[in-house]
Image (spheres, helix red, strand yellow):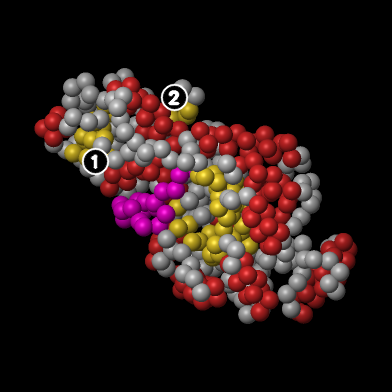
Amino acid sequence: MLLIFTHKVTNRLTYTAKQLFEKILGMEVSFTTKVEEFIKHSGPKMTYSKQPLQNEFFIRSNDLLFEQGINDVDIKVADWDGVPCFFAAGDKSAIPFDIFSASFFLLSRYEEYLPHVKDSVGRFPVKESLAYQHKFLEMPVVDLWAFKLLAALKERFPNIRRKDRTYSCTSIINVTTSHAYAMRGFIRTLGGMFLDLGKLKFGQVVQRFSVLLGIKKDPYDNFFELVDIHKKYPIKTMFFFQFAKHSAHDKNISINNNKFRYLIKSIADYSMVSLSTSFLSSTNKEVLKEEKRQLGNLINRPINYSRLRYNRVNVPAAYRNLVETEFTDDFSMGYTHEIGFRAGTCTPFHFYDINMEVRQPLKVHPFAMHDYALVNYRKKDEVFEKMDRVYRSVKQVNGNFVMVFSNELLGGKQHLDWMDLYQSFIKRYYV
């Protein structure tokens, strides 16, 4: 067990240290404010404070973990053997920066509490993030820092004990629109056809009639093709279905459509099914609770996992709503149109509510890529060049490589054959 001496044990410190040591490194950790207890401890130990006691393993602390609420933060990004870092710690420190404060800043999404202008659908813009501005968005820096800290600790304590973790890959299929043309009812079908005609999209008009006449399969209806792929490769997969009323942002099939209901129940026989929330329910607890209840009743299983519409994670409100509606896990922590790690990590972590200064029970699963981040790529080789770098960094720390795909893009073949690309991803990254 690693013992950490500090001048004050705070919720922020225990939250961050447990994430780094227990969740990422597989080590037990405890804390003390008593010098006598620290000196007596015969196992690995370190001091986290402003000054070392003697010449023990010491990390100089920033003030961030001993404050409350949100304050102005002065950040200067430096380099630690090729890995960006911030909150410099000075010469006496065993590592050049306060790893706990820097990790807390990223994991808690501290910067998203600071004033910023949201994008068109109410999200924190990726270009406002520290990671994007300093070009480390594609690196799971929190995990990389943890393993570099472990190496430094092993030099001082060669017999340090820990449990190794294993790399994993998870594929998420996000279904906000299950069918492009089928199951939409007469009025919506007629409206869609006139809209296509008005925009001179004659190809879509032909495709719509081909689907309605049963000549062609609906392009978005690739669910059992995906199930077949998942049977070949034992990768963890989840389908998130939207189960909501029609609105300007939510245009899925009616939840009362029997064919749609049967589709969801059929997929639930092969894979985990959970809720992709509607735009309204992302901010309305009562609507969220009702969507959760209705989907759970349909598949006769509890709905514990969520994905927020448009990955619209507005901290802390969005996550508080999920906690209050008894979701246990969320898979929305990432950027729709940029590859990388929004919270700087490829390890699941619990949501820390800064306003309440408490770790909440909701577990956050960060994703590395949403397929919409790939739409501007024209060649498969270019996609793999980018994704291989991200994969290698996750594999290096035995992290969780989570990818989000939409059945809509998987049904298309613009510059890329999306279904072929998907199968290539699964082959390449599942081990």
Quarter residue 37 falls in: top left
* Quadrant of the image containing the N terminus: top left
Q: Amino acid at mark 2?
A: Trp
- Residue 301 visible within the image: yes
Q: Position of residue 182 (x, y in %)?
A: 75, 72
- The residue carrying mark 2 is 80
Disc 2 secondary structure class:
strand
Report how far apart the C-alphas of labels 1 and 2 lie in the structure. Answer: 26 Å
Residue 337 on image: x %, y %: 62, 47
Q: Is residue 348 magenta?
A: yes
User: Could you say which is closer to the camera, residue 241 or residue 112?
Assistant: 241
Q: Which residues are magenta?
A: 345-363
Vertically, is 180 above or below 140? below
| Residue holding disc 1 | 30
Q: Specify whether 329 is left or right of 93.
A: right
Q: Quadrant of the C terminus?
A: top right
Question: Is residue 408 positioned above or below 157 on the image?
Answer: below
Residue 169 at x, y percent in the picture: 55, 46
Q: From the viewer's perspective, is residue 21 above or below residue 278? A: above
Q: Residue furthest left?
A: 36
Q: Give me the residue at 62% from left, 57% from top.
A: 173
Task: Look at 30% across and 27% down and name the residue there.
Answer: 159
Q: Residue at x 74, y 78 (%)?
A: 185
Question: In this orientation, which residue lies closer to the viewer: 201 or 350?
Answer: 350
**Percent x, y of residue 229:** 67, 54
How would you rate the neighbour count of disc 1 (Cα within 10 Å): few for under 14, some for 14-19, many for 20 or more? few
The mark lying in front, picked from 1 and 2, is 1
- Disc sitting over residue 126 in the figure: none
